[in-house]
Structures are given as structure tokens and as C-alpha cells.
Amino acid sequence: MRVLCVVPSNVIHETDQFIGLKNKGVDIHVVTTKIHEPDYSKLIAAGIPVHTIPLRGRLDQKAIAKIRKLMAQHKFDIVHAFNNKTVANALIAAKGFPVRFIAYRGIVGNVSFFNPGSWMTYLNPRVDRIICVAEAIRRYLLDMKFLWLKIPPYKPVTIYKGHDLRWYRKQPHDLAEFDIPSNAFVVACTTNFRPRKGIDVLIEAFNRLPREPDIRLLLIGNMDAPKLRKLIQRNKNRDRITLTGYRKDAPEITAACNACILPSIKREGLPKTIIEGMAYGVPPIVTNSGGSPELVEPDISGLVVPPKSPDAIANAILFLHRNPEQARQMGEAARERIRTAFNIQDTIEKTFALYHELLPDKKV
């Protein structure tokens, strides 16, 4: 069984998945649009051929020609592509080759029968399966209907992107870098500033918190937006909100906090930043948006609140602050949930089973 995986950049989740599939006997090749160390070296050390082919847009003729050349040389059985750009280019490259095609989908929404771009990707008839990173994505695709048009029920399948607790062994960051007192209760939010992420709702939630106790907010990621800075300046607790900018050590910063939150209002997939916090034993607060609530057993391994509700977010933060023992237990349960329900080995096994489903007569 020969599989070509086309990824935007090789990072640890896909790297360990590919190595796990190779260990099960899959002859796997990886096309990456961008080298990401040390995962690139890890793939090479595992004996997996890696081909770097930059993709400039959804229709990159040079890249398509290079992918076609690889396909002609190695006679792949399956092409597995991991985002919009790789799906679009790999589908064109696969024209004329007798391959099965798998597309990965990591976010709810933005697929429509009325969108020509969707027919170049997930609605393309050449796509045999759509791996959905959350059940919410699979349900969204199955609920899409227009006249006689609908996605066949067998096509979207849910396979969670698994993690490994061994990835999260670095020491928590020293929050003194951000002038945060050691006795403060700190909430971490790691994302980029986009309307659907609900950061404005989170800022308003902090505006509704009392001045006592000392509760701090760390906004981690690309959030240098004039609109956001204006919202913070108008906030009565603005001196307790810190913008860190983009940080490569975001998981370790979250590990040093008392809670992590993602206040998304729509279209969330399976948020990696919440998983990272849970893996470190930090109790999460998520909204009932997209795949976020699939991560959490409500009131056991975290808190789930309605989207667009500053009051609900404020109350959740205060609950964790006022109930430290229950918060500690939630953090432990969150870590255990990642270990058991979102394990990389499950991802490998389910992906391997899907490959066999598409190629029942093919021996590994």
C-alpha cells in the first residue's frame, strides 16, 4: 500500500501519525510545502521520503507538475491531502491516475454547493473520503442539502487528531516575564485575532469581573489589531490584560496558568490550543461552538458555556477561581481525557483502517 500525504507543513501531529503508519507497513511519502524542523529530520530518520514542493495558491501549475511526476514514479494507491490548498492542487495532479483520494477537513463551515472553490476541493467527485477532525464537521457536511445535491453519508468520517502527553513535558513558563504577581489567577487564551474567535466577547467578560480578586488575562498569538486595542483601553480591567504576541512557547505559557479559554462564536474545529492546555492539566473553558465541546466532559474535564455570552464566561472564570480543588480535579481529568480519548495511536489505527477500507484487496 503506497500513500502520498500532501501537507502544508510537517508538524509533530502529522509527523508522528506518518511514522506510526509506516511502522504498520504503509509505504508512505510526504509532500510538504514548508520544512518545519525538527519534524522534517524526524521523518527522514524514520525512512520516510519527504519532498518539499511550495504551493502558491490553489492552482499552482509548477507544483502540480512536480506532484504528478512523483505519482508517475511511485504508483501511489492513495493521495491524502491536509488543507484547502493541498487538496485543490493534489486533485488536479491526480487526474488520470488510478488513486483513491482522501481530504482532511479541520473546520466547520465554508463548504457550499454554491461555492465554486468547494467543487475544487471537498465536493469534487474524485474525493473518496473526507476525514473530519471533529464530529461537528461531519454533521455540518451531512446537513448540507440543495435540491438533489447532498454529500453521500459514507464520505465524511470523524477521526480526531490525536496527541501524545510526551509532547508536553517542558517546564511551565515563568509568568514574571509579563509582570504577573505569583498570587494572581491567570487565564490564557491562545489564538489569532479573528471575528469568529470571540475575543471581543472575552474582553467584555473581563470588563464584568470585579476588581477583587486579582484575575489576569494573557492573550497569546497574533492580536495586534487596532480594534482589539481600543476594546482593551475601554475595559475597566485593562491593566490586567496582557498581549504577548506570537509565541513559540505558547503551550508552556498556558501550562503556567490557572485556566485556558477559547471563546469562539462559530466554526471551530478541534482547537489545538485547548488540547495543549488540557495536556498540561489546565482546566479549559470552551464555548458550545463547532467541535470545542467534544473535547470536554462538562463540569468534569472542563466548562462549556454558550457562545457570545460575556456573563457566562465571567461566571466560569469566577467559578474556577473560587473552587480551586474542583479546578485542580478538572485539570487532572482534562489531562486524562487527552491521554485516553484524543490519543495519537487512535488516530493512526483509524487512519490505517480507512486506508484498508478504500483498498480492501491491497496488502500492506
Image: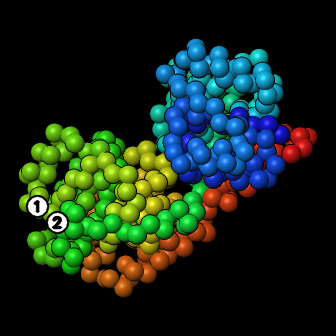
Position of 17 compared to 241: left or right?
right
Spot the residue most to the top.
61
Nearer the camera: disc 1 or disc 2: 2
Q: Is residue 262 something that shows in the picture?
A: no
Mark closest to the chain's N terminus, 1 or 2:
2
- For the point 33% across and 45% down, the residue is 192
Q: Closest to the observer: 74 or 59?
A: 74
Q: Quadrant of the N terminus?
A: top right
Tag 1: amino acid: Asp
Q: Is residue 282 above or below residue 362?
A: below
- Tell me how far mark 1 sits from mark 2, CA to CA: 11 Å
Residue, disc 1: 239
In what element is the residue under mark 2?
A: loop
Q: Is residue 62 above or below residue 303?
A: above
The spot of residue 175 in percent (x, y) is 26, 67
Tag 2: amino acid: Asp
Residue, disc 2: 179
- Circle 1 crowding by C-alpha within 10 Å: few under 14, some 14–19, many from 20: few
The spot of residue 79 in percent (x, y) is 71, 33
